[in-house]
Amino acid sequence: MRSALECCDARKVFYVKRERKNGTALSRLFAMAIPKYEAVEAVDRLTFDVAPGEIFGILGPNGSGKSTLIRLISTLLLPDEGCIKVFGYDVVKERFQVRKLINRVSVDAAFFKGLSAMENLSYAARLYGLDRRTWQTEASVILERLGLESDKLYEPLEDLSRGMQQKIAVARAFLTHPLLLLLDEPTTGLDPVSKREVQEFVLEERERHGTTVVLTTHDMQEADRLCDRIAVIDHGKFVALDTPEGLKSQVSTNGNYVTLEEVFFALTGKTLKGHTKSAN
């Protein structure tokens, strides 16, 4: 069976300007000899695949490479090395074919803020060539399923809460019935009830349409509940990849139960405050 997503030695490097600190004349002279920019491996030769219909989670600290990887898959960034394919289509050489098969929800969804939810969805429907006779009904059903009140559908998005805007972003993505759905922290800013509604909808869409999902999140309970497999990424590399239960068994000692949050801390070397653990 052909993979929904294949990454082979995918690599992305960013060049970040170095900070130059004030000091003595001699130290400033030495600093001038150091290049102004340093290379940061945002995605460091990742190789993995995702099966059709799988919900594949990616966990990692801020700045670990999660969102960069999502942007590479969605053709918004070009990999410096390696190959990424979506249902056999190369994201660089066949990016237009890839875009027909995917949709993406990010933590900072882009909208025409002066337009209403339905007007924004209308734009997306036309962009994807959806049937005019059916998309409005389907959009209303999706928005209702996500818990968005009907009286909010025709208000300008700039007048809606951050959580409501995020629900509309999720609805817009599902409206196009993508074969591969990229969810980059989709429930950030949602209250617990709204978060659960989105999670239930993701599971239902996978069940009804066989949608493949790649999910990044900081919510360990969300990852545990939704994901068939989870990769833990740190400094651009996968430090572990397994089922949620498999990851827990890697960290558990003497058969003791551990949470996915404890797995995250153990595999990324972070404490609850986000500081690196001592080697002692």
Image (tube, rainbow, N blue to C red):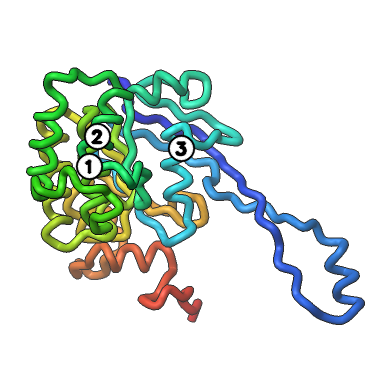
Residue carrying label 2: 121
CA distance for labels 1 and 3: 38 Å
Residue carrying label 3: 47
**How far across and down, in percent of the image, does residue 173 sit?**
26, 36
Residue 202 appears in the figure: yes
- Against 193, is 3 above or below? above
How many residues crowd mark 3 within 10 Å: few (<14), some (14–19), many (20+)? some
Residue carrying label 1: 117
Q: Are discs 1 and 2 less than 8 Å apart at CB?
A: yes
Residue at image coords 46%, 30%: 84
Q: Amino acid at mark 2?
A: Leu
Q: Nearer the viewer, mark 3 or mark 2?
A: 2
CA distance for labels 1 and 2: 6 Å
- On residue 13, the disc is none
Disc 3 on helix, strand or loop? strand
| Quarter that holds the N terminus | top left
Q: Amino acid at mark 3?
A: Thr
- Against 87, is 263 above or below? below
**How far across and down, in percent of the image, does residue 161 sit?**
24, 58
Residue at image coords 32%, 60%: 218
Q: Amino acid at mark 1?
A: Ala
Identify which residue, 258 or 195, lies in the foreground: 195
